[in-house]
Amino acid sequence: MATHYPKRRSLIKRARKFGFRARMRSKAGRKLVNRKRSVGRSVNVRSSF
């Protein structure tokens, strides 16, 4: 059987789609961040690429 390789995700593309700056770009994203913060979760930017 052939070896299965996992998907090679680009962290830059991921950050642009799901990152903090992407969240803050839309009204719904800002609401989501505020909702997470109100629960007590720290909403951070992924720092390492």
Image (cartoon, helix red, strand yellow):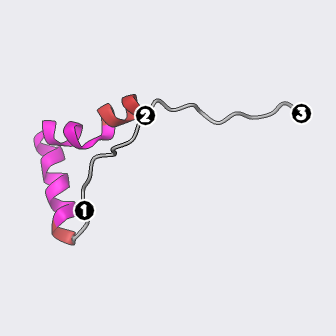
- The reply to whether callout 2 and callout 3 are in contact (CB within 8 Å) is no
- Does 33 lie within the magenta span? yes
Query: Three-letter amino acid code at disc 1?
Result: Ser
Relative to residue 37, is residue 26 depicted above or below?
above
The first of marks 3 and 1 along the sequence is 3
CA distance separating discs 2 and 1: 20 Å
Query: Three-letter amino acid code at disc 2?
Result: Leu
Asked if residue 8 lies left or right of residue 19, the reply is right
Name the residue carrying label 3. 1
Task: Please give the name of the residue rendered at 33% of the width and 44% of the height, measured from the top-left corner.
Answer: 47
User: Crowdedness of circle 1 by 10 Å Cα count: few (<14), some, many (20+)?
Assistant: few
Q: Secondary structure at mark 3?
A: loop
Relative to residue 9, is residue 43 depicted above or below?
below
Name the residue carrying label 1. 42
Looking at the picture, how far across and down is residue 9, in whole percent?
Answer: 51, 32
- The reply to whether callout 3 and callout 1 are in contact (CB within 8 Å) is no
- Image disc number at residue 11: 2
Query: Three-letter amino acid code at disc 3?
Result: Met
